[in-house]
Amino acid sequence: MLDPFTLPFVQRGLVEILILSVPAGLLGTWIVLRELAFFSHAVGTAAFPGLVLAAGLGFSAPLGAFGAAIAFTCLMLALGRGRVAGEDATTALALVACLALGVILASDVFHSGSDIETLLFGSLLLISSQDIVVAAIAAAAVVTAAGMVGRRWLAVGFDPDTARNLGSPPLPLDAGLLVLIALSATAALSAVGAILVSALFVLPAATARLFASRVATLQIASVGLAAAEGVIGLWASVKTNAPPGATIAVVAGGGFAVGTITRLLGPRLRLAVAATTTLAVVLAIAGCGGSGGRSSGGPKVVATTTQIGDFVREVGGSAVDVDQVLQPNTDPHEYEPRPSDIENAAGAGIVFASGDNLDSWIGKVVDESGSGATVVDLGADAPVKLPGEASGPEASRYDPHWWHDPRNAEAAVRTIAEHLSHADPSHAATFHRNASRYLAKLRDLDHRIAACMASVPLALRKLVTDHDAFNYFAERYGIDVVGAVIPSQTTQAQPSAQAVANLVDLIRREHVKAVFPESSINPKLAETIANETGASSDYTLYGDTLGPSDSPGATYVGMERANAQAMVRGFTGGARSCFGSGQ
Amino acid sequence: MSSSAPLVEARELAAGYNGRAAIENLTFTITQGERVALLGPNGGGKTTLLRVLLGELDPLAGSLRVAARRGVVPQTERSRLDYPVSALDVAVMGTLARLPWWRRPARSEREAAREALEAVGLDGFEHATFGELSGGQRQRVLIARGLVQEAELLLLDEPFTGLDATSAAGLEELIADLAASGRSVIVAGHDLQQAHRMDRVLCVNHRQIAFGKPSAVLDLPTLEATYGGTIVELPDQPGRLILPPHHHEHAT
């Protein structure tokens, strides 16, 4: 039952959550007593511009986050003109200012949101030694401060008007408290992320507050509860293969619910109900999971993206165990690792990655798993390369969407066959046979798309997509990329009003007949622009990910056929189609 | 300190906010062991005077000399009654004024707080939750906190508000004891009967209306000038005055 804690990456998460529970519980007491829950939630989110700056200018993320959180705190103090606690309106004002700055920095200055998503959510499974050091610093600072001025914080909260007469001036004391919350919340970012910071800092203390009649008990209970909920959440996340941050939030929320209900009961029933509920949940989770079991005895392989997973299954057939990290229709730009991803990486011999910033997180996953796996960057071997974005941290020498040129897919398949044969020579013949058969299919696909596209007059082949993912496809089949709704190779950017207006003009001027939404991205903006210009938005493309198993885009071949079909129909206003009317 | 040297000496004192005076022309002295009733309508500047006496506001004009450690006893409703604090926790807060900011109260500070609770008649209540005590008991806890501060001048802001007659009588007795033990006490309020039993009365309505012994101050014209309204004289008790209800929360 305790087997999850034998995994090294889980152990590191365990250390991190145990350290964090100290500042979380101690500060949680004051957050709850001083009604600073909104501030503690906002301060993590307000770290956003700091993270973008740190990524863009290349300094350390915790420093950027802490800097932004301090700036946010100062802005809030300035807006509140010295009146601190419970000023929700000033907190909201300062938060909006920070978020707006972050969005502008990400979209217009650095053209990137790279890594922002992971930092907003965090992951206990990808804890580095630096994260642990930062958490320990926060814990030490909070323990020291709470020991020295805890009574004064109490005096200020108890009656701010009298506190000064009691040698406890509210402004410096409150400012110190807010700075410590900022420090601890940003230290927790890499573990639980900004969105779930409250799960650690507010919920345990709020639950303990239901029962504690003294501040000292409240503090001890909050620390204990934060630690227990963190550990149970981490354990449950490994058992159920759910993201740990969200699982801890669910456990903490459940703890608060149980606390609220038991508080309504008599003292004798109280303990019984709390104990029974906890036991039932723990046993239910313990019964879950038990992953794995299937094994071919062949090489264990991890594939990051859906299309690479498809290539490896085509080449390896039943002789290879493939674990695919991303699931269909999930955006690779937004990814939070699950426990199984790291476990699989730990046991893998080869990790096939798409390369560049599309799945750069795999390096961290492999590192954390302690795996000795060979990481093969399939994008690096692509024979056809198009330039990437010029600036920002999303900048790369090459456009990462290489698989949309079937010739690059062919090269990737050859590389996969080489590595699999090397890893398992006894099946080398099978791998090469499978690869040859699949390569023939890919060549056929390439010819058919080329032939079909050639039937569409060049003047009609004008492509407007959701984000810049189809340059390889366009280059291969003579399509003119007029623009993209999100003018970036990442889905994380946001277009400015000016950019949207320019695109609308361009679509009208160029007589573009269709705007193509992507299956894994919210189609709203593409639909709005289509409506504005009279273009169609009925034809969806598979961009960064394959579709689910019952869709035409469930395989790589199906995906490219469906894309070609959608484009030809969109370009011709539905007049022409490629592969019969079905797809 | 000799009992003749005044602890508080105000001359032509004015105080207020943003440069505008809320009270002016205050001239009075308070000596050790004196009980002073501070009378005045709501909004007439009582709180401003307490704040300038505490040193939270600087005088705008005139001079003020306070040669005493000051302790404030606010209305108990101003405190967070939902806080998880015991009577002892609140009394211990009184030690924070004397400790350097990085020092936490230790055993000796808790001992002093326990003694102060005993001194205000709350022995056995130190572990009671503050918010669950009665209004009179809470007031005593806050006075104990002032004792822990070793305050020589205690400023009580409408301490009788919301108290029943028995609690009020007990509290009045406690105030007399504090004065007898050498502390000076200023009691802001509206109760004219109580004011009669004090050593001095200070009537304030944006300016000083009167200051002196109760017998000299508590007459109809002065109180009318203080409260700006009609004062009702009790028909069967000549010389005893009562305020109209809107100024007054515990008429007897």
Image: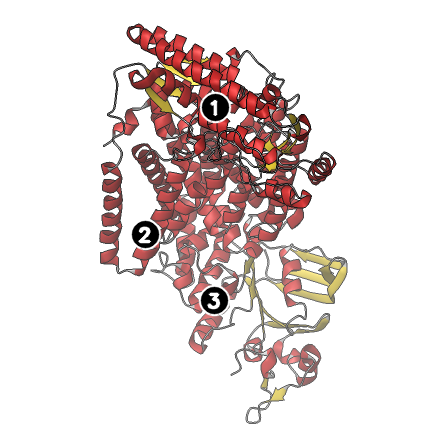
- In the image, residue A414 lies at what x, y percent? 44, 10
* Colour theme: secondary structure
Q: Which residue is mark 3?
A: B177
Task: Determine crowd level at label 3: few under 14, some 14-19, many 20+ residues with C-alpha closer than 10 A.
Answer: some
**Nearest-to-viewer mark from 3 and 1:** 1
Q: Kindly report the distance in space between the C-alpha atoms of the residues bearing marks 3 and 2.
A: 51 Å
The residue drawn where x is 31% and y is 5% is A425
Q: Are marks 3 and 2 in contact (CB under 8 Å)?
A: no
Q: Which residue is mark 1?
A: A361
Q: Kindly report the distance in space between the C-alpha atoms of the residues bearing marks 3 and 1.
A: 74 Å
Q: Which residue is mark 2?
A: A258
**Nearest-to-viewer mark from 3 and 2:** 2
Chain letter of the residue beneath label 3 in the structure image: B
Q: Are marks 3 and 2 on the same chain?
A: no
The amino acid type of the residue labelled 2 equals: Val
The residue drawn where x is 72% and y is 70% is B206
Task: Determine crowd level at label 2: few under 14, some 14-19, many 20+ residues with C-alpha closer than 10 A.
Answer: some
Closer to us: A529 or A326? A529
Chain letter of the residue beneath label 1 in the structure image: A
Relative side of A420 to A100, left or right: left
Q: Kindly report the distance in space between the C-alpha atoms of the residues bearing marks 1 and 2.
A: 37 Å
Against B238, is A388 above or below?
above
* Quadrant assignment for the N terminus of chain A: top left
The amino acid type of the residue labelled 1 equals: Trp
Mark 3 secondary-structure assignment: helix
Q: Are marks 3 and 1 in contact (CB under 8 Å)?
A: no
The residue drawn where x is 32% and y is 32% is A238
